[in-house]
Image (cartoon, coloured by chain):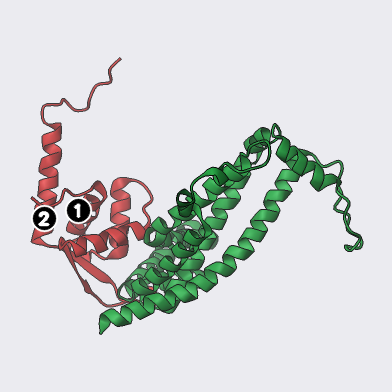
Chain colours: A red, B green
């Protein structure tokens, strides 16, 4: 079993899956911020992407630049088989934790 | 097209490993131009950009800041809360227990940060910026800490004969007439006001000393990091 993914790692991985061929830094940042409904630091996303790449869960390649970026290259990310497995395991662990509970939990007292 | 502040962008470049520079600065530039400036205006977009740069710094070097902040807090606590004779409680501790909060450790942390910065970014400037950044964060923390603790600490200090004597000496001593036109004797000075200006002076002096030390450590630590990298590469 792979390492259990943290919730932010899951958010980043799922953003890459959703964005598919358009998964580069800024798009991932905005997707994660939209899903989590809060402002997200670019450095946090970048650090997570670096960590996921070191773990072998994602792979990156450099794309071309655009005028709005002054021609600077975009780095595109793709989730690897190991990354998809880790996401599925995280989902299964999450579901297992909630199994048997009525949702939403009722407040007591 | 609008550009983010040049200094912030240069700083960001000095903080990133070479492989990430283009992609990361490009992402921030694109977000700045395409979203932040049109939505919030130039000034707020600049502030957002500066926050992102600060975030990158803290993520890369945040752990190095911790021992420096602990040193500042511990030393200030022991400086403030003394026994009636003025002796610091820190003086009674064994020498080994003082090592973690000694100036030597602070210098070692600055050197290590600079060495790591150069190693990580593969640039001398990366190490110097890391060391200077550490100084800025620590200095800002000192400013906040001293302001936040001024009043409660002064309340406790006013019950200690040592601090009362220090206040009296500072406000009523006879000063030599060398400073023409400047009379530091201020008999009407309240304890709190005296303590406030003492903190301001200490903050200014500590800032000068720490700034100079962090530049020297930045250069020396960068040389260490650079040498290590070259030795490993062989």
Mark 2 crowd level (few <14, some 14–19, many ≥20, 10 Å Cα): some
- Residue A10 in percent (x, y) is at 21, 50
Horizontal side, residue B63 vs residue B74: left or right: left
Q: Nearer the viewer, mark 2 or mark 1?
A: 2
Q: Nearer the viewer, residue B37 or B217?
A: B217
User: Residue tagged by mark 2?
Assistant: A84
User: Residue tagged by mark 1?
Assistant: A14
- Residue B199 in percent (x, y) is at 67, 49
Q: CA distance from mark 2 to mark 1?
A: 9 Å
Q: What label sits on residue B222 in the rendered view?
A: none
The quarter of the rendered structure image containing the C terminus of chain B is bottom left
Horizontal side, residue B51 vs residue B208: left or right: left
Whether residue B192 is situated above or below residue A68 in the rendered picture: above
Residue under the image location 22 percent in, 27 percent down: A104
Secondary structure found at label 2: helix
Q: Nearer the viewer, residue A61 or B206?
A: B206
Whether residue A94 is situated above or below residue B140 in the rendered picture: above
Horizontal side, residue B181 vs residue B75: left or right: right
The chain that hosts pointer 1 is A
Whether residue A72 is situated above or below residue B85 in the rendered picture: below
Residue B29 in sight here: yes
- Residue A58 in percent (x, y) is at 17, 63
For the image, the number of numbered tags is 2
Mark 1 crowd level (few <14, some 14–19, many ≥20, 10 Å Cα): many
Q: Nearer the viewer, residue B217 or B78?
A: B78
Q: Nearer the viewer, residue B31 or B135?
A: B135
Residue under the image location 63 percent in, 35 percent down: B152
Residue under the image location 30 percent in, 14 percent down: A109
- Residue B213 in percent (x, y) is at 56, 68
Horizontal side, residue B185 vs residue A28: left or right: right
């Amino acid at each position: 079993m792979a390492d259990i993914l943290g919730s932010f790692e899951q958010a980043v991985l799922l953003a890459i899956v959703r964005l598919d061929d358009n998964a580069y830094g800024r798009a991932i940042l905005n997707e994660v911020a939209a899903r989590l409904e809060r402002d997200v630091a670019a450095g946090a996303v970048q650090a997570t992407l670096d960590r996921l790449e070191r773990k072998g869960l994602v792979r990156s390649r450099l794309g071309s630049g655009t005028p709005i970026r002054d021609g600077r290259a975009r780095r595109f990310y793709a989730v690897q088989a190991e990354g998809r497995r880790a996401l599925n395991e995280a989902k299964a662990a999450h579901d297992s934790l909630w199994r048997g509970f009525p949702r939403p939990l009722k407040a007591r007292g | 097209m609008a550009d983010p502040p040049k200094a912030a962008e240069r700083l960001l470049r000095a903080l990133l490993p070479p492989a990430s520079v283009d992609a990361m600065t490009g992402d921030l530039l694109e977000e700045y131009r395409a979203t932040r400036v049109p939505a919030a205006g130039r000034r707020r977009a600049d502030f957002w950009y500066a926050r992102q740069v600060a975030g990158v710094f803290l993520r890369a070097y945040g752990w190095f800041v911790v021992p420096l902040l602990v040193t500042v807090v511990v030393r200030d606590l022991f400086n403030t809360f003394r026994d009636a004779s003025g002796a610091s409680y820190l003086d009674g501790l064994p020498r080994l227990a003082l090592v973690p909060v000694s100036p030597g450790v602070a210098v070692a942390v600055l050197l290590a940060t600079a060495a790591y910065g150069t190693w990580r970014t593969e640039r001398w400037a990366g190490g110097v910026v890391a060391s200077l950044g550490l100084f800025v964060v620590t200095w800002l923390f000192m400013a906040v800490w001293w302001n936040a603790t001024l009043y409660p600490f002064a309340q406790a200090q006013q019950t200690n004969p040592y601090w009362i004597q220090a206040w009296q000496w500072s406000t009523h001593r006879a000063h030599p007439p060398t400073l023409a036109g400047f009379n530091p004797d201020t008999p009407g000075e309240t304890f709190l006001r005296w303590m406030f200006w003492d903190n301001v002076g200490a903050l200014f002096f500590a800032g000068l000393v720490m700034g100079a030390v962090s530049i020297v450590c930045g250069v020396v630590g960068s040389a260490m990091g650079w040498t290590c990298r070259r030795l490993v590469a062989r």
